[in-house]
């Protein structure tokens, strides 16, 4: 049985969604953010020293990092589903998206969140942050203008991994200028497995 250490309103929601898409049995161990700091509780450090979510346990294996978890679950349990043929060039694109989500796209969104809390002190940073957001979100919008999902006509783990980028961008009011990105996010959130994962995970602020 796969165990998901699930923190509310976090990246671990997409791991629940992936498990629902794959139809795999799993159990959830729930953790709540501190209402004052919004940080994960210290109990997560008993699972992994970093004290972050998502974390999964699969028998003797403990896996952290969303991209690594998506890759692990699809590679070990997917039976060829939700990823392109590993021998194809499309697979290389798929792997790039798994890394792009946290390696590139998430940084300006997080900076926008934290710098926004600084008020006037953060004003000098906003033009650079907005430029980077336009760069990344525009790139995604252009890709999704040509294809319904990131690596073709069918959903893959790349879409699941990248979904959090779309959700945070939407929460920050950034999708109005990117209609193809907004439509992609709507397609993802309308999937039965996505809705079931939200039911299983509990209240999720980024679900529409």
Image: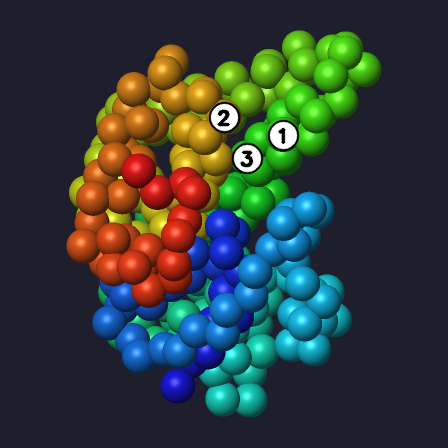
Spatial CA distance of label 3 from label 1 is: 13 Å
Q: Residue 184 in the image: x percent, y percent?
A: 27, 34
97 or 201: which is nearer to us?
Answer: 201
Q: Residue 154 in the image: x percent, y percent?
A: 20, 48
- In the picture, the disc for residue 172 is 2
Is 162 left, or right, of 49 in this rendering? left
Which residue lies under the disc numbered 3? Answer: 105
111 or 203: which is nearer to us?
Answer: 203
178 or 204: which is nearer to us?
Answer: 204
Is 91 left, or right, of 22 in this rendering? right
Which residue lies under the disc numbered 1? Answer: 113
Whether residue 94 can be seen here: no
Query: Counting residues from the N terminus, which is met first, the one under dot 2 or under dot 1?
Result: 1
Q: Residue 160 in the image: x percent, y percent?
A: 37, 51
Q: Residue 125 in the image: x percent, y percent?
A: 74, 16
Task: Kindly give the residue lying farthest to the bottom in the view shown.
Answer: 60
Q: Quadrant of residue 14?
A: bottom left
């Amino acid at each position: 049985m796969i165990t998901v250490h699930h923190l509310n309103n976090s990246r671990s929601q997409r791991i629940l969604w992936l498990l629902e898409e794959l139809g795999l049995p799993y159990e959830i161990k729930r953790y709540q953010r501190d209402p004052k700091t919004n940080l994960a509780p210290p109990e997560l450090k008993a699972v992994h020293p970093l004290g972050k979510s998502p974390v999964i346990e699969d028998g003797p294996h403990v896996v952290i990092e969303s991209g690594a978890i998506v890759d692990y679950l699809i590679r070990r349990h997917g039976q060829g589903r939700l990823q392109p043929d590993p021998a194809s060039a499309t697979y290389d694109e798929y792997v790039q998206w798994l890394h792009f989500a946290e390696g590139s796209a998430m940084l300006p969104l997080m900076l926008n969140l934290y710098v926004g809390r600084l008020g006037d002190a953060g004003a000098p940073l906003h033009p650079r942050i907005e430029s980077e957001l336009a760069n990344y979100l525009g790139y995604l919008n252009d890709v999704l203008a040509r294809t319904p999902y990131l690596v073709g006509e069918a959903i893959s783990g790349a879409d699941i991994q990248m979904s959090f980028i779309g959700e945070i961008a939407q929460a920050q009011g950034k999708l109005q200028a990117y209609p193809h990105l907004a439509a992609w996010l709507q397609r993802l959130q309308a999937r039965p497995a996505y809705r079931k994962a939200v039911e299983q995970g509990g209240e999720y602020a980024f679900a529409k």
